[in-house]
């Protein structure tokens, strides 16, 4: 579950302050997907940063996977992120030198686990790559994969720790329409199968009718939007 209640986040901007998120509230239940749309600079990335435990807001209540994020130390917030939150960014930020399998396994292996734990990590990585449609591509490096395949690696990587919450920022912006629809279908299936609370920012209104909830952000203010009305707009 993701629960934001009356959240406000400001940034200093010279003499004044910018209100990036203005008394925003939202709930994303497990197994459902909420999309946020809104103009550039309306506060969407700031809201995702709050829900990802990357930024603590000035005021309000934030609960993610049952954890109260307000008042956590940076180290505690990092621990919550690693344990409960999967994040997929707009640009695939894969490491050029690593194979698809290693992109998934490397973070777990940096923790210095036993040989058995490493084997288990690789098995999990292999299964997740197969789940996102990349069986047979485990040993390819990013330049050997298409844009859509790279985004699939990103998604699989975000699922490595079996997160309760999935935060996705513009997953289709670098893809053509058909490839974008496939990625949205995959994210929807994973949300249902794994019961994640998924929060997604998108510019592409053609996806909105498939979402459980659509919220519009405007100058930091969130308002509900009928997913089916949005497509006609
Ligand atoms: N670190 C920061 N320091 C100062 N101001 C910031 C910071 N991050 C965001 N802002 C400001 O907060 C407001 C909301 O920005 P945000 O990036 O959240 O919007 P957005 O809807 O995600 O935009 P885009 O679609 O272009 O990514 C903007 O006025 C922006 O300039």
Image (tube, rainbow, N blue to C red):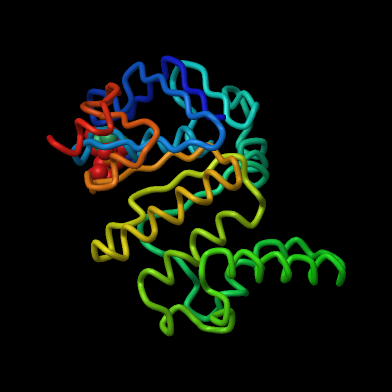
Residue 18 visible within the image: no
Q: Is residue 5 above or below residue 203?
A: above
Q: Nearer the viewer, residue 116 or 16?
A: 116
Q: Quadrant of residue 164?
A: top right
Q: Nearer the viewer, residue 162 or 92?
A: 162
Please state the horizontal and vertical placement of residue 203, each as a whole percent of the image. 24, 46
Q: Image quadrant for the C terminus?
A: top left
Please state the horizontal and vertical placement of residue 56, each as a whole percent of the image. 49, 29
Residue sitting at the far left:
233
Q: Is residue 228 above or below residue 15?
A: below
Q: Residue at x 50, y 72 (%)?
A: 95
Please state the horizontal and vertical placement of residue 13, each as a whole percent of the image. 25, 31
Number of callouts in the render?
0
Q: Quadrant of residue 200?
A: top left
Residue 79 visible within the image: yes
Quadrant where ligand 1 appears: top left
Q: Image quadrant for the N terminus?
A: top right
Q: Residue at x 58, y 69 (%)?
A: 129
Q: Residue at x 36, y 36 (%)?
A: 46
Q: Residue at x 24, y 30 (%)?
A: 14
Q: Is residue 190 left or right of residue 176?
A: right
Q: Is residue 122 left or right of residue 152?
A: right
Q: Quadrant of residue 145?
A: bottom left
Q: Nearer the viewer, residue 120 or 21?
A: 120
Please state the horizontal and vertical placement of residue 29, each as a whole percent of the image. 53, 29
Q: Is residue 167 left or right of residue 181?
A: right
Q: Nearer the viewer, residue 111 or 67?
A: 67
């Amino acid at each position: 579950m993701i629960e934001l209640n009356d959240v406000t986040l400001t940034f200093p901007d010279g003499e004044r302050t910018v209100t990036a998120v203005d008394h925003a509230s939202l709930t994303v239940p497990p197994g459902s997907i909420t999309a946020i749309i809104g103009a550039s600079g309306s506060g969407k990335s700031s809201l995702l940063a709050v829900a990802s435990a990357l930024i603590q807001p000035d005021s309000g209540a934030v609960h993610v996977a049952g954890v109260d994020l307000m008042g956590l130390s940076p180290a505690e917030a990092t621990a919550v992120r690693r344990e409960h939150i999967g994040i997929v960014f707009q640009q695939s930020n894969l490491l050029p030198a690593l194979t698809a399998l290693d992109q998934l396994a490397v973070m777990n292996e940096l923790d210095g686990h036993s040989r058995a734990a490493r084997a288990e990590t690789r098995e999990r990585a292999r299964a997740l790559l197969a789940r996102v449609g990349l069986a047979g591509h485990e040993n390819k490096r990013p330049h050997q994969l298409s844009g859509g395949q790279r985004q699939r690696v990103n998604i699989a990587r975000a699922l490595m720790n079996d997160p309760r919450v999935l935060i996705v920022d513009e997953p289709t912006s670098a893809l053509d329409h058909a490839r974008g629809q496939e990625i949205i279908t995959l994210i929807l299936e994973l949300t249902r199968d794994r019961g994640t609370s998924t929060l997604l920012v998108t510019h592409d209104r053609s996806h909105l009718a498939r979402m459980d909830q659509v919220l519009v952000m405007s100058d930091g203010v969130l308002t509900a939007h009928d997913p089916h009305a949005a497509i006609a707009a």
